[in-house]
Amino acid sequence: MDLVEVSPGATPPVCRVMDFGKFIYEKAKKEREAKKAQTKIEIKEIRLRPKTNGAHRDFKVDDARRWLGQGHKVRVTVKFRGREMDYPEIALEDLKEIVHDLSDIAVVEAAPQMEGRTMLVILAPAKSAVKKKDKSEQSEPKTEAQSS
């Protein structure tokens, strides 16, 4: 048995007589459980160029829609090469179109901005889209295999 300081921040500090090894083990176990319970938000990325055609961009927007529906954040970047740097308004227009296409399920977390040779915008899932997804998963009808 050991004298263990349980909460040193309290006034006065709290101490107990207990098995120190068991105390450390239980504390580590609680930390592991807390780590399992926390959600990790992943940032997915879509990379485009100013010359990217509409059909290819639509495929990328569909991927972003799927990721936002899963609750991930999406970073849309437009890379500039050479003289493309002289026309950032082309990329800004593309980003605005993408934001408009995804406005039903996403909100803009970081407005379009230039970072070196890239222009980027960060989209986060809208609260209503995530709630709708959760409700639809709960209200799905059971199949015959599940009901038997």
Image (cartoon, grey):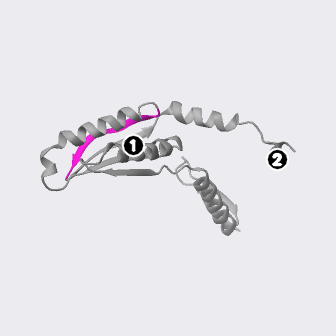
Position of residue 121 in the picture relative to residue 9 (left or right): left
When the figure is inspected, residue 65 is found, relative to residue 45, above or below; the finding is above
Position of residue 123 in the picture relative to residue 12 (left or right): left
The magenta-colored residue range is 105-116
Distance from disc 1 to disc 2, alpha carbons, whole Å, reads 37 Å
Is residue 38 part of the magenta span, yes or no?
no
What count of labels does the image hold?
A: 2
* Residue displayed at 24% across by 48% down: 51
Q: Looking at the picture, how far across and down is residue 77, in whole percent?
A: 31, 49
Residue 15: quarter of image: bottom right
Q: Is the magenta stretch mostly helix, strand or loop?
A: strand
Image quadrant containing the C terminus:
top right
Is residue 108 part of the magenta span, yes or no?
yes
Q: Any mark on residue 79, and which? A: none
Residue position for label 2 = 145
What SS does tag 1 mark? Answer: helix
Residue position for label 1 = 58
* Residue displayed at 45% across by 43% down: 62
* Residue displayed at 41% across by 31% down: 103
Q: Looking at the picture, how far across and down is residue 69, in whole percent?
A: 52, 41
**Lower sequence index among marks 1 and 2:** 1
Position of residue 17 in the picture relative to residue 60 (left or right): right
What SS does tag 2 mark? Answer: helix
Give the foreground label among 1 and 2. 1
Q: What residue type is labelled 1?
A: Asp
